[in-house]
Image (cartoon, helix red, strand yellow):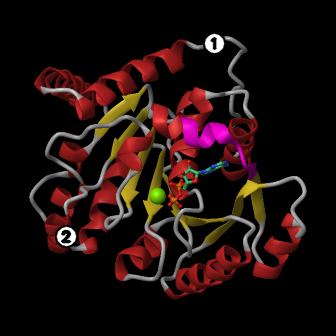
Amino acid sequence: MSHETVYAIASGKGGVGKTTTTVNLGTALAEAGERVAIVDADLGMANLAGFVSLTPDSTTLHDVLAGDASIDDATYRLADNIVAVPSGTNLDEYAETSPEGLREAVEELQSQFDYVFLDVGAGISHETVLPLGLADAVVLVSTPEPAAVHDTKKTIELTDRAGGEIAGLVLTRTHPDGDVSHDEIADRLEVPLLGTIPEDPAARDSVYAGTPLVVFEPQGPAAVAYRRLTAELTGVEIPVPADGDESDAEEHAATADATATDSTDGDDGREAAHDDVSSAITEAESDP
Ligand code: ADP
Ligand code: MG
C-alpha cells in the first residue's frame, strides 16, 4: 500500500533536534515495513549523512538541484526499506544550487516510497520556505526553551505563507522538572502537540556511532518516545524491538567503523568505505 506522504521537519531555531527527528521517524517507519526516503534539505548546513554513517561518493542533492544528476543518482540505501538523499557540504556547490528543482525531486521520491521526510534548514531563507509549501504536512520541532518556542511562531507563519499545512509540534530535549507545561506551549502556538522527546544522552552517543537512536538504544527513553511519536504522526503501528535484539545495531556499527576508519586512516579505509557505499548504491538501484 502506498501512502505517498511527504513531511517537512522544520524549526525556527537551529540545533533543536530536526535531524535527529528526521532520522528516527524514518527509521522507525522502515522497521515497521514502510518504504522511506529521508532527504537532507538543509542545503546550507547539511549533516544528515553523519547521523547514519553515510559517506556519499560524489553525488548529492546539490548535484540534483544544479541539474547535473538525477535524484536516483543521489539516493543511497541505509538499511532495509530506507534510503537517504544527502546534501553536499561544499559552499561553492551550494552557491550553484537552486531549490526550485526540489519539487520535481520530491515528486520522484514520492512515486517510489511510502514516506518522504525533508530535513529542512532552520531560519527563514527561500530554501527553507519552499519545502514547507511542497510537503503534505509540516512537523515543527522545538525545545521548550522560550527562544526556540518564539522562533517556532515564525516557522508557523512561513508555513501559512507557503500554503503549507502544520501537522503539529514535537518538543525535544524535555526535562521532567521543566517549569512550563508542554501542553501549554502547544496551546500558545495554537498547534497540536504530537509528542515530547526527553533529554537523553544516548541521542548524542548515537550520532557519534552514526546509528539512529531507535536502533542504537531501542529501549532508551528517547527511542521509546520517537516510536510513540511515529505512531501518533502516521497512524502506523510501530513494532517494539525485543530486548537483546542487537543484530541491526551491529550491522550499523560495522558501517560506522568503516566510516571512522575513513576519516582517520589512510587510503585503505577510504577504499573500504567507498566500496561500501558503491554496493549500497547498486542495491538502491536494483531495489527501489
Ligand atoms: P538540528 O537538526 O535541529 O540542528 P540535531 O538533530 O542535529 O538538531 O540535534 C542537535 C544536537 O542535540 C545534537 O548534538 C543531538 O545529538 C542533540 N540532541 C537531539 N535530541 C536530543 C535529545 N532528545 N537528548 C539529548 N540530546 C539531543
Ligand atoms: Mg540538522
Res. 83 image quadrant: top left
Q: Is residue 1 visible?
A: no
- Residue at horizontal 35%, vertical 50%? 109
Which residue is denoted by mark 2 in the rendering? Answer: 97
The answer to whether residue 204 is magenta is yes
Whether residue 256 is in magenta: the answer is: no
Q: Indicate the quadrant where residue 284 lies.
A: top left
Mark 1–mark 2 distance (CA, rounded to whole Å): 42 Å
Image check: 241 left or right of 183?
left
Q: Which residues are magenta?
A: 197-205
Q: For the residue labelled by badge 2, is the local secondary structure a helix, a strand or a loop?
A: loop
Local crowd size for mark 2, using a 10 Å CA cut-off: few (<14), some (14–19), many (≥20) = some
Residue 117 percent across, percent down from the top left: 48, 53
- 252 vs 120, nearest the viewer: 252
Q: Residues within 10 Å of mark 1 (few under 14, many from 20)?
A: few
Residue 56 locus on image (x, y percent): 23, 40
Point out the image quarter for the C terminus. top left
Mark 1 sits on what residue? Answer: 245
Residue occupying image coordinates x 68% and y 33%: 238
